[in-house]
Image (cartoon, helix red, strand yellow):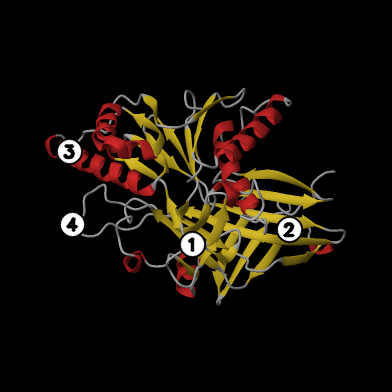
Amino acid sequence: MTAIALLNVNTDPHLVADTLLSVKGQDPKSPRRIWLPALGLVSTEYESHEGVWYISRLGRKTFFLPNGAGILAFAGDCHAAFQFWAALSAKYLAREARDPSFRVNAALIDQTIHQLGACGRHFSLLGVLVDPRGERAAYFHNQHVRLQTASFGTCYLSGSGWTLIKQTIMGVDKLLASSKGWPGDYPISATEDLAEHISSVMLYHDSDNRNGKRPGSPLSHFTGGFYEWYQVGNTGVRPMSPRVDINIRFDDDRVIITRAYFVEQLERRRDPGAHKEAREFPVFVMNLLLDPYEIDAGSIDDGGHVITLGKTRGVLAASTLRSYDATEEDRGDLSGPIYPEMLEELFSDFYKVHRVRVVAVANNQSKTRRLISAHDQEPDAVLHYENDVLSMWLSPRVLARPCR
């Protein structure tokens, strides 16, 4: 149960994956509530044509391969994927003991899946492998859909929510085909833009209060939470950059920010004595607003606008596989209020955010826009924590009313 995608596999490979973990049956925990970034605190339980199911937590479904050998993402049964990951890890450690530079390759993955027997049929894999010469090769296992596009080459999709990602890819591909194409001097590639666009727009779709109740909504496809993405280059994997997502509704004389998120990939410190590859890279999604924020349109000028933020809340999506066999108590709740100490650590200096994604709604129509600046240029959002107050400055470009 998931949605994963491998974009532009032959030219500029990017891997995208959601973080929602679902289980068939009733939730054994109490209370049956979970924090989802786009919806807030909601019930864990939902119904489908297959019966009751529940959201267990948010977790990363991707995992990096040691020594820069690439990245894989799984879809399907978590237990089966864990069995594969544990077996592959054991094989890697045995080989690494003799050859510290050893890289996981397709042959080793195939052998591992074959030895799992019937278990191997219960999960799918998409990913990119990088060999010692820097050559990249796509890897697939089990069910996947091949999608040919004009602007993004060959893409592969898998998981219960693959149709939602397909709709987004085809929409952007059609838009590019009808325009002059992607500008060659833009700071990022068209495929990187698509990966980040999927991440942002799926978060927006998740925020519909009918999510899980309306057919075709993300939760009815057992997918959502947050979509992480990675670029795979010749020298290894590059994670997504920090960004702010803003959802804005424009009325006649009011600008209403309905959602605002700060997103960043963190690195946890290794335990002393742990293996050099035993690192954790949780995805941090922070709700900057818990209630809509209204701005008088007349107060927005060329200097932008500063918003004073109130209570904030965040969630960490850690590795699903690393913590799969841990007890619920040991996993802990990875969501909750953001305390002053963490705000001080993150934003005591002026934190310049050079990537902002906006979903603007005006006249009952929604439009998306990207605002990306180089690190030596002025940003479109700045977060700052001072005197127990978190504030966010937004540039005039962020708050501009979309053209009709």
* Residue tagged 4: 273
- Identified at 31% across, 53% down, the residue is 322
| Mark 2: amino acid | Gly
Taking the view exactly as shown, the residue that stands out farthest to the left is 98
* Residue tagged 1: 315
> Mark 2 or mark 1: which is in front?
1
| Mark 3: amino acid | Glu
Q: Are marks 4 and 2 in contact (CB under 8 Å)?
A: no
> Mark 2 or mark 3: which is in front?
3
Q: Earlier in the sequence, mark 4 or mark 2?
A: 4
How far apart are the two marked residues, 4 and 2, measured between alpha carbons?
Answer: 51 Å
Q: Earlier in the sequence, mark 2 or mark 3?
A: 3
Residue 46 location in percent, x, y?
Answer: 56, 58
How far apart are the two marked residues, 1 and 4, measured between alpha carbons?
Answer: 28 Å
Front-most of residues 147 and 49: 49
How far apart are the two marked residues, 2 and 1, measured between alpha carbons?
Answer: 32 Å
